[in-house]
Amino acid sequence: MPTKTTAKKTVKKSDKKVVKQATKATKAASKEAGARARTTASKRPARRDVIAVLKADHHEVEQLFRAFEEAGDHAYVEKRDLANRMIAALSAHAAVEEQILYPWVRATIRDADDQTLEALEEHHVVKWLLSEIEDMDPEHERFNAKVTVLTESVRHHVREEETEMFVDLRAVGTRAELLDLGEQIIAARRTAPTRPHPRSSDTPPMNLIGGTVNAALDHAREVGREVVGALGSIGPSAE
Ligand SMILES: [Fe+2]
């Protein structure tokens, strides 16, 4: 039979062992949780601020312009495809800037009214050009000229945005605000029109309402085109 002192020592020893095991288990669990959190964070795309998001759009459109300029004189199919991609990219880009960026700039940056009003007019001209290019045969003698003027107009607009408006944005907006605007732009693009609507309102609140309706109409038109295309590839039934 152990003496009182021996029993006390035995209990103390076993207590220590339990505490040691518990600490080890807790450390292992927290290590695992840390690794899980790091994996989740690395899978999550890094947040981009509004300037990074819009500059990426500008870069994408510039690539389309260059491809068009390099396409051969008779590369009508390629030019039609490039023009269609310009229409979709520029229509969505203009819509989200008008819904999110320009209202924020006007409300936040002092003396930015003229800058944003000019940007809206440049968008307006671009939308008219896009709507004409959309319905024009790429073999039409005016087709290349229209895309050239579109390219010049957009390059001018992009240069002004990147060297003036974005500089002001960087100076005035906090990092959190610019990141938040970037997220709003990405979210708005999911429901943005993919065709130009030069007659629709380009300022809030009407552009927010009209934009949703136009996007739904654009989507329906795309689906219609795909169905017609699919039927065309099947060909007429032999009756
Ligand atoms: Fe713009």
Image (cartoon, rainbow, N blue to C red):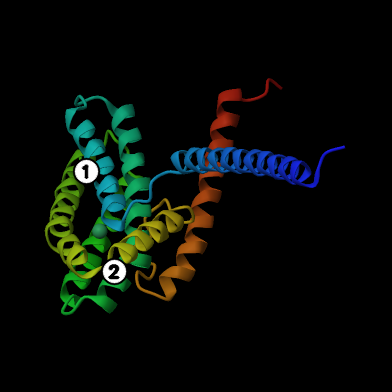
Residue type at numbered disc 2: Tyr
Image quarter (top left, top right, bottom left or bottom right) of the C terminus: top right
Q: Nearer the viewer, residue 224 or 95?
A: 95
Residue depicted at 16% across the width and 56% down the height = 162
Q: Quadrant of ligand 1?
A: bottom left
Relative to 60, say whether 109 is above or below. below
Q: Which residue is mark 2?
A: 102
* 180 sits to left or right of 216: left
- Residue 16 placement: quadrant: top right
**Residue at the front extreme, as displayed:** 3
Helix, strand, or loop for circle 2?
A: helix
Image quarter (top left, top right, bottom left or bottom right) of the N terminus: top right
Measuring from the top left, give residue 210's x and y in whole percent. Answer: 46, 67
Residue depicted at 63% across the width and 40% down the height = 20
Q: Residues within 10 Å of mark 2 (few under 14, many from 20)?
A: many
Q: Which residue is mark 1?
A: 147
Q: Nearer the viewer, residue 40 or 119?
A: 40
**Residue at the right extreme, as displayed:** 1
Q: How many marks?
A: 2
Residue depicted at 56% across the width and 24% down the height = 233
Relative to 167, say whether 31 is above or below. above
